[in-house]
Image (cartoon, rainbow, N blue to C red):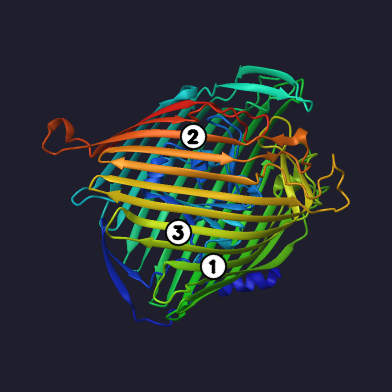
């Protein structure tokens, strides 16, 4: 298999152009005239997206908070300004989610988690969620290797006529002693080249009051008190820069990202322990870039590359538990080439080859110092025949680990081929408002370095986690040019997921990066997702955008039918943290320069163990968030107002009714809190 992969990797290098004639379409933009080759086609399976007015309304939130308004999504949030925030889609586990930043995946070979709290919303233009994989074939091989994907697209500079720069300054402040200034500078260097640099700082003491209440199985209240969350402070700094370019036959970009944080870890509130002293330091650096070239009307290729260096230190100075001062350093190198050929006007073929190297060093005794080589090959094709469109792909994965310690052997090389099929059909002739869709995908994930090699915790015998996904859905959308209703959209999906050798991550102790891993066995997930959205406009100054979604999920442990003890048994139980019912609703009302935004999130009852007994029961929780904003536009004729393009003031109240709740048991979330934002664009 490894020899075959190496051979195909060579074959996947740029194909010679077999059609030199060019079908070009000229488009004007703020960076001059750009020539785009080929035909743009809609996605076979639509994604869930946040952009435009909806994203602007959520601009004061984090990426993780914004994802809460997608159907089928569960966010693990450990509370506070600096608490770890990860995403899980359709109950398959956080590690099955791929997070892509400007088209290249964010990796963490150590524990597989990507903290979504470290990305600034000010620099983001769109967030998209795909189930299965991104439903297009022209992409790197790694994009085919996830059960679900979150694509974060940052802003590409746009300039008004006659202007060569934009500057945006933002100042946030509010509860928990939070202060967060942001500066973004966009520069147009020539007709084809522009750049952007953004930087932000966040400081907060992280203190907030919460209610600590314990009710015994008999119904007696054991204790009921109010305390203040401690050791949740955060100091973080982020800076990133990017250069964007256009050529006559393509585009290119290069991005540099650096993040540095120092945070307290408040820990789980158990056994009447309220204060913790653990701390965590993170430094994340990556450099990435991509180049897309249209060689001819029928052939184009994309080159992508990345280098990442991540450093983390975890300190536990408490001798009563376990003295720890652990330090880790990860390195990742990644290179990809994707080739797209148009065989016929409605038939495309893509061949992608990726290579990735990961290493992990630590100051732990008897550490294995693992190195992992990954070679990915993807073959995909897409065809359209009238109202029928289909995409099929197969991903070849070859992985082998090596360790630097003789007594810890690396895992044997693993080779697998995994398929995916996507189908879309418009049942009404000459009408694209209604579309039916279907997809099937088989994929797996390897245990992470922590799972396998963490000293005294990792188990080299852990099995890969295998998933199969089946989805059937429909989408209806219609636009009107006149009247109050301008847009209506409805989506519904039913899905069935099979997960074998399910790996469950449970926090070990009070740290947020150490995990106790175990194979649960078999999990069967049956669910329904619905989303409805409408846009209304009346008179000249009023607009209203409403969106709501609902998710039902039955995610049951089906490992061992004999494990059915009424008290301790887990067979047939809902797996940990997965609610049966969840949903959200957002509304954005605008009148001239005034905006009013409302957001509601509901998570139903669930259990923190597959043993669904009363002691493991977690109550439903919900939150209401409100914000009001006013935008003041600069006027050229007024001296005091001509130095800025716009100035926006926002006041936000989160958890309006002060609900006390936990997303993760014993990690209390903040009650009612406030935030004020001033945003100025020059």
- The C terminus appears in which quarter of the rendering? top left
158 left or right of 283 in image: left
Please state the horizontal and vertical placement of residue 237, each as a whole percent of the image: 47, 33
Is any atom of residue 391 visible in this view?
yes
Query: Which numbered mark, 2 or 3, is in the foreground of this view?
Result: 2
**Quick one: label 2, few (<14), some, or many (20+) residues within 10 Å?**
many
Please give the residue where the numbered disc 3 appears in the rendered image. 290
Of the two numbered discs 2 and 3 on the same chain, state the one appearing first in sequence: 3
- From this view, report whether residue 222 is shown above or below residue 604: above
Q: Quadrant of residue 317?
A: top right
Please give the residue where the numbered disc 1 appears in the rendered image. 437
682 left or right of 364 in image: left
Is any atom of residue 141 visible in this view?
no
Which element carries disc 2, helix, strand or loop? strand
Which element carries disc 3, helix, strand or loop? strand
**Quick one: label 3, few (<14), some, or many (20+) residues within 10 Å?**
many
- From this view, report whether residue 24 is shown above or below residue 522: below
Q: Residue at x 48, y 41 (%)?
A: 119
Q: Foreground residue, 354 or 123?
A: 123
Please give the residue where the numbered disc 2 appears in the rendered image. 624
**Quick one: label 1, few (<14), some, or many (20+) residues within 10 Å?**
many
Query: Which numbered mark, 1 or 3, is in the foreground of this view?
Result: 1
Q: Residue at x 65, y 51 (%)?
A: 553
Q: Residue at x 60, y 52 (%)?
A: 97
- The N terminus appears in which quarter of the rendering? bottom right
Of the two numbered discs 1 and 2 on the same chain, state the one appearing first in sequence: 1
Which element carries disc 1, helix, strand or loop? strand
Of the two numbered discs 1 and 3 on the same chain, state the one appearing first in sequence: 3
Please state the horizontal and vertical placement of residue 545, each as a whole percent of the image: 38, 47
């Amino acid at each position: 298999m490894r020899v075959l992969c190496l051979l195909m990797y060579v074959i996947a290098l740029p194909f010679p152009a077999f059609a030199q004639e060019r079908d070009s379409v000229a488009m004007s933009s703020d960076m001059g005239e750009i020539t785009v080759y080929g035909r743009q086609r809609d996605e076979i399976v639509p994604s869930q997206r946040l952009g435009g007015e909806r994203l602007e309304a959520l601009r004061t939130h984090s990426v993780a908070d914004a994802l809460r308004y997608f159907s089928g999504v569960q966010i693990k949030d450990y509370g506070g300004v600096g608490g770890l925030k990860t995403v899980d889609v359709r109950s398959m586990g956080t590690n099955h989610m791929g997070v892509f930043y400007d088209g290249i995946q964010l990796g963490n070979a150590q524990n597989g988690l990507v903290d979504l709290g470290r990305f600034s919303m000010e620099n983001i233009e769109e967030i998209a969620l795909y189930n299965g994989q991104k439903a297009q074939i022209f992409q790197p091989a790694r994009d085919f290797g996830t059960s679900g994907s979150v694509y974060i697209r940052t802003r590409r500079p746009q300039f008004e006529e006659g202007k060569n720069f934009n500057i945006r300054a933002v100042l946030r402040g509010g509860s928990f002693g939070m202060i967060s200034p942001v500066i973004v500078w966009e520069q147009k260097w020539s007709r084809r080249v522009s750049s952007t640099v953004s930087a932000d700082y966040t400081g907060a003491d992280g203190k907030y009051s919460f209610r600590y209440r314990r009710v015994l199985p008999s119904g007696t209240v054991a204790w009921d008190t109010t305390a203040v969350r401690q050791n949740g402070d955060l100091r973080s700094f982020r800076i990133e820069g990017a250069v964007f370019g256009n050529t006559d036959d393509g585009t290119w970009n290069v991005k540099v990202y650096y993040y540095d944080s120092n945070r307290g870890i408040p820990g789980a509130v158990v056994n009447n322990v309220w204060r913790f002293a653990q701390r965590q330091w993170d430094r994340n650096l990556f450099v990435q870039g991509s180049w897309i070239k249209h060689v001819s009307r029928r052939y184009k290729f994309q080159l992508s590359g990345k280098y990442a260096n991540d450093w983390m230190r975890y300190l536990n100075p408490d001798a009563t538990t376990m003295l720890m001062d652990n330090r880790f350093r990860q390195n990742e190198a990644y290179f990809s080439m994707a080739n797209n050929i148009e065989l016929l006007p409605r038939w495309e073929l893509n061949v992608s080859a990726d290579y990735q190297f990961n290493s992990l060093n630590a100051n732990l005794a008897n550490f294995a110092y693992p190195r992992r080589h990954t070679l990915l090959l993807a073959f995909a094709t897409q065809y359209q025949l009238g109202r029928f469109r289909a995409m099929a792909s197969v991903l070849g994965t070859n992985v082998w680990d090596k360790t630097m310690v003789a007594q810890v052997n690396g895992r044997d090389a693993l080779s697998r081929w995994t398929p995916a099929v996507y189908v879309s059909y418009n049942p009404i002739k000459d009408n694209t408002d209604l579309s039916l869709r279907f997809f099937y995908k088989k994929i797996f994930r390897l245990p992470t370095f922590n799972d396998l090699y963490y000293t005294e915790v990792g188990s080299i015998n852990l099995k890969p986690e295998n998933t199969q996904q089946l989805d059937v859905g429909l989408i209806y959308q219609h636009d009107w040019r006149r009247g109050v209703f301008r847009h209506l959209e409805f989506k519904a999906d039913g899905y069935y997921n099979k997960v074998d050798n399910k790996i469950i991550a449970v926090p070990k102790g009070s740290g947020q990066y150490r995990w106790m891993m175990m194979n649960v066995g078999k999990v069967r997930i049956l669910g329904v997702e619905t989303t409805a959205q409408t846009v209304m406009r009346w008179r000249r100054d009023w607009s209203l955008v409403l969106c709501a979604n609902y998710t039902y999920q039955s995610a049951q442990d089906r490992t061992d039918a004999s494990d059915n003890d009424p008290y301790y048994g887990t067979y047939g139980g809902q797996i940990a943290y997965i609610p049966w019912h969840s949903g959200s609703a957002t509304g954005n009302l605008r009148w001239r320069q005034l905006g009013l935004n409302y957001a509601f999130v509901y998570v139903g009852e669930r259990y923190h163990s597959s043993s669904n007994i009363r002691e493991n029961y977690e109550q439903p929780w919900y939150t209401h968030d409100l914000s009001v904003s006013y935008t003041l536009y600069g006027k050229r004729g007024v001296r005091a107002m001509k130095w800025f393009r716009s100035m926006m003031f926002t006041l936000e109240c989160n958890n309006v009714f002060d609900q006390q709740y936990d997303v993760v048991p014993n990690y209390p979330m903040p009650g009612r809190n406030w935030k004020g934002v001033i945003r100025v664009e020059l």
